[in-house]
Amino acid sequence: MSIEQIIVIAIIQGLTEFLPVSSSGHLALIPVMTDWPDQGVITDVMVHVGSLFAVIVYFWRDVLNLLKGTWDLVRFKTTDNSRMAMYIALATIPALVFGAALKFSGALDTLREDTVAVAKVIAWTAVFYGILLWVADVVGKRTKKMENMTLPPALIIGLAQSLALIPGTSRSGATMTAARFLGFERTEAARFSFLLGIPAIAAAGGFTAIEAVQTGGGIPSYAIWAAILTFFAAFLAITLLMALVKRVGFWIFMVYRLALAAVLFALIYEWVPGFSLV
């Protein structure tokens, strides 16, 4: 893999993982929009791991409280931290189950092989979930903070997270949409979304690392460098998103998603002579 491809992958993943615009969708489009080969699942997961560390650093206080809560759970001690740790753990289960089902069915691997099909899925999900995010932001109340989280809304947000395995959906977008519909403040919806992503991303990274070792391939050095570069881009993206949702709201991301879909549809259906996906 060339240094140019590594840099582009890292920047795209870092900037889009926590913006509600679908990082997986953008990563899938790299081989579509360029003559570069598909970067592969291992690289995709490693850049997600880079994003994971950015979340841990940015929200280190929340992460520390979750670790304390996990220790409290082990000791069967009920505290605010232990309840939040339990909510995060239980809300992660739907994504793990759905992800395992897709992995063993081979559905996503089959989809990745069809360039036009991938682009169509990303385009339509970009439109649908972009509009849904805007609607949630408009109609959702702003009365709840993360401290008001209970098990039912946590599970609903967890179910929304599982939808992000469909290319173009956006894990952060789906979870923030659900949280806004449930009445959580914008910044609190983003905060819970980021923390909920930690175990899911960690599980995906760990599973892929084990799989790579078992097959004897290991994790290539370029994937590690991509993860390191992604960390810095992701930290910048988190800072940007927290500022935008507080001052502007989510409509700006709907506009971006619709623009992305328009470009994809133009390529898919060859609206511009000389430009297509094939």
Image (cartoon, grey):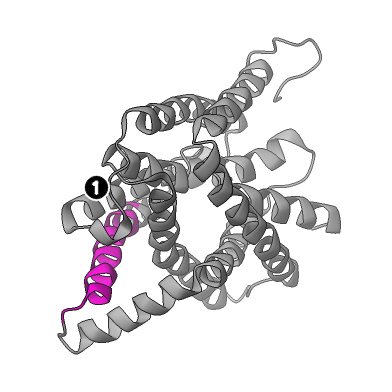
Which of the two residues, 17 or 139, is positioned nearer the viewer here? 139
Q: Is residue 155 above or below residue 84?
A: above
* Residue found at x 20% / y 78%: 79
Q: Is residue 98 left or right of residue 113?
A: left
Label 1 Cα neighbours within 10 Å, binned few <14 / some 14-19 / many ≥20 = some
**Is 137 covered by the magenta stretch?**
no
Q: Residue furthest bottom?
A: 75
Residue 80 spot, x, y in % from top left: 23, 73
Q: Quadrant of the C terminus?
A: top right
Residue lying at 36% horizontally and 49% vertically, measured from the top left: 161
Q: Position of residue 189 (x, y in %)?
A: 38, 49
Q: Which residues are magenta?
A: 78-98
In this rendering, the answer to whether 192 lies above or below 89 is above
Quarter occupied by the N terminus = bottom right
Where on the picture, by quarter, is residue 239? bottom right
- Determine the residue positioned at 62% across, 23% down: 259
Predominant SS of the magenta segment:
helix
Q: Residue at x 63, y 75 (%)?
A: 218
Q: Residue beneath label 1, please?
A: 156
**Residue 35: which quarter of the image?**
top right
